[in-house]
Image: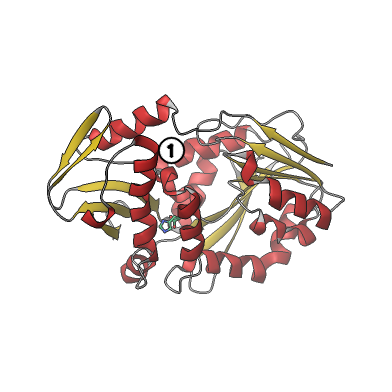
Amino acid sequence: MLQFIQCTEQENENDRSVRNELLAGLSAAQAFTSPKYLYDALGSKLFEAICELPEYYPTRTEALIFKTHGRAIAQAIGSGSTLIDLGAGNCAKAARLFPALQPAQYVPVDISVSFLHESLQRLQQQFPSIVMTGVGLDFSNELLLPDSVRNEKRLFFYPGSSIGNFTPEASLAFLQRIHAACDADGSLLIGVDLVKDKALLNAAYDDALGVTAAFNLNLLRHLNHLLGTDFEVRGWRHRGFYNQQESRIEMHLEAATAQTVRWPQGERRFERGERIHTENSYKYTQHTFTDLLEQAGFRRLSCWVDPQQWFMVCHAHAA
Ligand code: AVJ
């Protein structure tokens, strides 16, 4: 059985609240934008390219953990789960777990259900015995799943260290919402990037080919499209570095020269060197992250790391 449900309004280009939120951020003394605007069609492709870079270890390291510990992970989870894939995209990471996990229902969730159509049609042919329910939902603020998502044995899947985009406080709130969406038999399978040598972190977010720079700079093209701003991409530089104090990677766009950016209802002057903060990617120690899971109400944790201890995958029961 295959079903698609669009829950939240899809963000369209003239959405007032999106405009207001973005323009408020751009007009702030310290200009900022939400990292979700990095992912237009080209941005999503550039992120896929990032995942192939030798410097960008998270994707490959997480995959290694799933490969090495797949049996133990499947054993901790058991079969017949309702696999809820948060930010599923092309559904590839979850699909690799199907043979070992044998879920009863697969529920990929993404902002737009249209992202899920093709991949899910194909997956349903490959795994006809799994009920598949594609859900279009912006789960960053609220996690209200449609009724056709079974309550039994929910397994929330949140790989790739996407949790790193939230501040630790927002992460706790997000994990609490997942916990609340679980019955006593529910659980969470989550990937998180770990604190490591600063040089490795800096290289992963400022690669030699400049793919991460292109990914970050592409935001300006996306903003021009969304807001009618007149950003000149060549007038900006990518900055990506580890902030040890805050335990996070920061990405910024830095004005190479003083300039004024205009849009239909306003403008903003940027001095040379002034920045727009475009992303945070928090890094955890094994201990601070398992603490956070327990604070959110999760119990009976099993965690796996790669030999270099660069990345961690945790399974945690709701009760
Ligand atoms: C998709 C949020 C996990 O933080 O590593 C990669 C995004 N930004 N390179 C990350 C990203 C720059 C990525 N996450």
Q: Residue at x 21, y 54 (%)?
A: 235
Q: Is residue 52 visible?
A: yes
Left/right of residue 269 with respect to residue 72 in the rendered view: left
Coloring basis for residues: secondary structure
User: Foreground residue, 178 or 258?
Assistant: 258
Q: Is residue 168 above or below residue 210?
A: above
Quarter of the image holding residue 132?
Answer: top right
Q: Amino acid at mark 1?
A: Ala
Q: Is residue 82 left or right of residue 243?
A: right
Q: Residues within 10 Å of mark 1 (few under 14, many from 20)?
A: some
Above or below, 54 against 150 in this view is below
Residue at 50 percent across and 54 percent down: it is: 44
- The image position of residue 266, as x and y in percent, is 22, 29
Residue at numbered disc 1: 170
Q: Quadrant of the C terminus?
A: top right
Residue 13: image location, x then y, percent: 45, 34
Question: Quadrant location of ligand 1?
Answer: bottom left
Q: At x 64% / y 42%, what residue is drawn?
A: 114
Residue 232 horizontal side relative to residue 186, left or right: left
Locate residue 311, reporting x and y percent: 50, 63
Secondary-structure class at tag 1: helix
| Quarter of the figure with residue 239 | bottom left
Q: Residue at x 45, y 53 (%)?
A: 43
How many marks the image carries: the answer is 1
Q: Is residue 183 visible?
A: no
